[in-house]
Amino acid sequence: MAARIVDRTDGETLRGFVDGHATLEATVYTDGATAYAGTGRSTTRSGTASARTSVKYLSGAKVRYPG
């Protein structure tokens, strides 16, 4: 698994990250951003949390969810 907080969420940045970290057979879990289109991989929306929040959680940071 690879995850990283990125400063820009444009297609070029996100596709570059995916290309550098995922095989063509991988499923990419996203926050639903259309910028992931064109990766050539299967994508699945990972729920209501943003990708940035998910990365913070995976890195061991304390995450607060509203509600």
Image: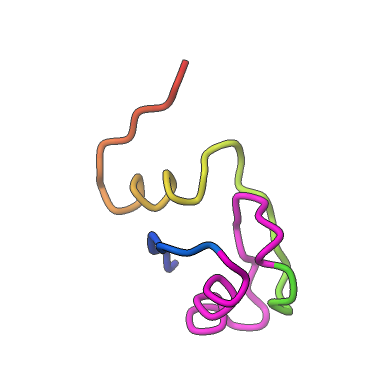
Counting labels gives: 0
Q: Is residue 35 above or below residue 39?
A: above
In the rendering, at what x and y percent does residue 60 appear?
25, 47
Task: Write down the quadrant of residue 48 in the picture.
Answer: top right
In the rendering, at what x and y percent does residue 31 appear?
60, 50
Instruction: Residue at 47% x, 15% y: name it.
Output: 67
Q: Is residue 35 magenta?
A: yes
In the rendering, at what x and y percent does residue 17 appear?
50, 76
Instruction: Residue at 71% x, 74% y: name it.
Output: 41
Colouring style: rainbow
Instruction: Residue at 52% x, 44% y: name it.
Output: 50
Q: Quadrant of the N terminus?
A: bottom left
Identify the residue at the far top of this view: 67
Q: 65 left or right of 56?
A: right
Q: Is residue 47 above or below residue 29?
A: above
Task: Write down the quadrant of residue 64 in the picture.
Answer: top left
In the rendering, at what x and y percent does residue 12 appear?
59, 77
Q: Which residues are magenta?
A: 10-36
Give whichever of 52, 11 is nearer the camera. Answer: 11
Q: Is residue 21 magenta?
A: yes
Instruction: Residue at 62% x, 71% y: name it.
Output: 11
Give whichever of 65, 9 is nearer the camera. Answer: 9
